[in-house]
Image (tube, rainbow, N blue to C red):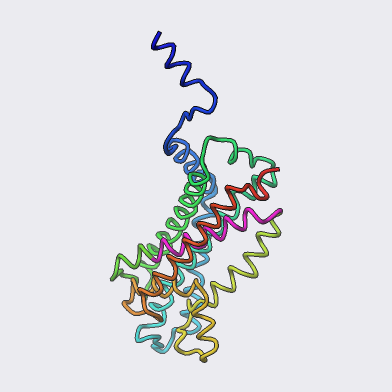
Amino acid sequence: MNDQTDRRTMNEPGTPVIPMINWTGLWTLYLKEVRRFFKVQLQTIWGPALTTLLFLVIFTVALGRAGRTVMGVPFADFIAPGLIIMGMMQNAFANSSFGLLVGKVQGTIVDYLMPPLSTGELLTALTAAAVTRAILVGVAVWLAMLLWPDVHVGVRHFWALIWFGLMGAVLLTLLGLLTSVWAEKFDHAAAVTNFVIAPLSLLSGTFYSIDNLHGTFRLISHLNPFFYAISGFRYAFLGVADSPVLIGATVLLAINLGLGALCYAILRSGWKLKA
């Protein structure tokens, strides 16, 4: 009799089957997203890594001759960390801005909405997958730079490497998720990439020190969140930065917390996701 009562209680409508975190579902969605970009790794990992290395070759050949230095270090050593984190951030955005959008375009968005996953679990899985791609791209570029002549990318501050690498990747991941929800076709996502992400990346101090800028342009650079990620990540390798490292770390954390809360609220509301 007790067994029958317990069985009826468990089957009553409204009784939570997964009362806590759905670790199995979260892990499954994470693996799905990772396998999606890993199946085309030539395009999602090795292609971006090669493009980043080409930037290094072009700029060091064009501007790094005659012993040019920036902030007291050789020019090649100065731009190498910025190129690594820039590649990571751009690919984090590319990954997160594609998942939900392709689901809406192809009519498979139900695969994200119907599983027994909470909003937090959905957000966590998508973010973790995009950050994973960013890390793989960063590691691929870093390993290639280790073998590149006259470029030194030894790590001095591992805490800064981890913190700013993760904060930069999460920042672009959350922006990508917002883009993926807002966009209704691939042209919309491409417009954000071309007119927002690319300019912010290139004008973030990757190829120059903002100390050489006029006061107004220096102020504008400090308003660019990409600048803090690149400056802090460069500090991990060189021990020098364009701005106070702790301030940059705090700014990125605050921005990511705000974007994370916004993403959570939008995903929870189902805006542009649920008919």
User: Which is nearer the eye, 92 or 119?
Assistant: 119
Residue 234 in percent (x, y) is at 38, 74
* Magenta range: 164-184
Residue at coordinates 52% horizontally, 21% vertically from top-left? 12
Give residue 161's quadrant in the image. Answer: bottom left
Q: Is residue 164 visible?
A: yes
User: Which is nearer the eye, 267 or 237?
Assistant: 267
Residue at coordinates 45% horizontally, 32% vertically from top-left? 18
Q: Is residue 257 above or below residue 109?
A: below
Residue 93 in percent (x, y) is at 55, 59
Q: In the drawing, does residue 251 fall left or right of residue 262?
A: left
User: Which is nearer the eye, 243 or 80?
Assistant: 243
Q: Give the quarter of the figure containing the N terminus.
A: top left
Q: In the drawing, does residue 66 fall left or right of residue 107?
A: left
Q: How many marks?
A: 0
User: Which is nearer the eye, 121 or 9?
Assistant: 9
* Residue farthest to the left, as pictured: 156
* Residue farthest to the top, as pictured: 1
Residue 30 in percent (x, y) is at 48, 44
Residue at coordinates 59% horizontally, 55% vertically from top-left? 97
Q: Give the quarter of the figure containing the C terminus.
A: top right
* Residue farthest to the bottom, as pictured: 214
Q: Is residue 158 above or below residue 214?
A: above
The main secondary structure of the magenta stretch is: helix
Q: Is residue 263 above or below residue 141?
A: above
Q: In the drawing, does residue 213 fall left or right of residue 231?
A: right
